[in-house]
Image (cartoon, helix red, strand yellow):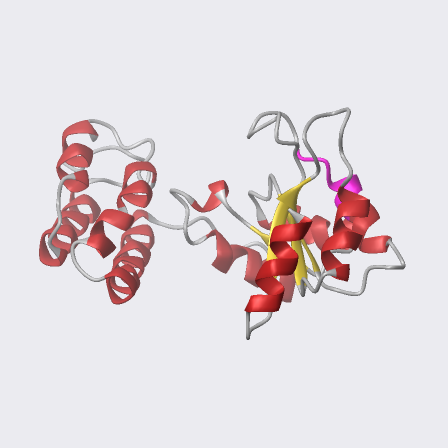
């Protein structure tokens, strides 16, 4: 890993960052020394996922080792923490308790892409935003769909959003057929119409409107 990082740094005209885990398993977690070595070969920022390779996505992320890297006096580059950040409160704790320079949010954003808005507001104002209404969820998904298409074009931008569509409407009763239809769409206008249909036919409590 260090050799690859060094080669990329030497070949690149822009800053190179890296992301890694704590180590291979509970008996092999050399992240503190690995972080030093990555910094020594020119990595400009390091993201650390607080799990081992053996854990995959099971168990709980260990932020104490992330903090140990951050508090290592040899480390001068930004340290970004990753793992189990699924709420604004956990995001703030990552900064206050573990001292990281930044955080990454991964799986918690799938089906809840607006989590970043909630986290930012809490970090800036120390208050939690109210839960989103179904209409607000729909409007945010529309915006994200437009941005996704700007990035990936059609149909790639719509296909890219399917993970969000699949998990954004948990709890809506009798929703299976509508979800399946939504996940098969590839045209923007069809997606927008389907999202409008969802907002019009279900209540915030998940029940169908009569």
Q: Which residue is at 29% across, 37% downward?
A: 166
Q: Up-down: is 200 above or below 17? A: above
In the picture, measured across the screen, residue 23 lies left or right of residue 55, that is right
Q: Up-down: is 200 above or below 25? A: below
Q: Which residue is at 33% across, 44% downward?
A: 164
78 magenta-colored: no
- Residue 182, quarter of the rendered image: top left
Q: Which residues fall within the magenta stretch?
A: 61-66
Q: Nearer the viewer, residue 43 or 124?
A: 43
Residue 156 visible in this rendered orientation of the protein: yes
Indicate the position of residue 181 as horizontal and vertical percent values. 12, 37
Residue 129 visible in this rendered orientation of the protein: no
Residue, far bottom: 13
Quarter of the figure with the C terminus: top left
Indicate the position of residue 73 as horizontal and vertical percent values. 90, 59
Residue, far right: 73
Q: Nearer the viewer, residue 190 or 151?
A: 151
Q: Which residue is at 67% across, 30% downward?
A: 24
Q: Which residue is at 34% across, 37% downward?
A: 167
Indicate the position of residue 55 as horizontal and vertical percent values. 61, 26
Q: Up-down: is 125 above or below 118? A: below
Q: Up-down: is 138 above or below 177? A: below
In the picture, measured across the screen, residue 157 lies left or right of residue 168, that is left
């Amino acid at each position: 890993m260090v050799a690859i990082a060094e080669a990329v740094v030497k070949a690149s005209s822009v800053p190179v960052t890296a992301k890694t885990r704590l180590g291979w398993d509970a008996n092999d977690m050399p992240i503190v020394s690995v972080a030093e070595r990555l910094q020594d070969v020119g990595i400009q920022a390091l993201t650390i996922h607080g799990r081992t390779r053996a854990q995959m996505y099971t168990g709980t992320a260990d932020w104490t080792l992330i903090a140990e890297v951050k508090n290592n006096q040899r480390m001068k580059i930004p340290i970004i923490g990753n793992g189990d950040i699924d709420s604004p409160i956990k995001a703030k704790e990552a900064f206050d308790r573990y001292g990281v320079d930044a955080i990454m949010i991964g799986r918690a954003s799938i089906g809840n892409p607006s989590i970043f808005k909630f986290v930012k507001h809490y970090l800036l104002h120390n208050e939690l935003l109210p839960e989103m209404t179904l209409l607000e969820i729909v409007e945010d998904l529309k915006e994200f769909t437009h941005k996704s298409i700007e990035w990936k074009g059609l149909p790639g931008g719509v296909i890219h959003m399917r993970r969000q569509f699949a998990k954004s409407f948990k709890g809506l009763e009798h929703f299976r057929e509508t979800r399946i239809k939504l996940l098969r769409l590839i045209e923007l206008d069809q997606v927008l119409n389907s999202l409008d249909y969802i907002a019009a036919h279900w209540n915030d409590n998940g029940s169908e409107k009569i």
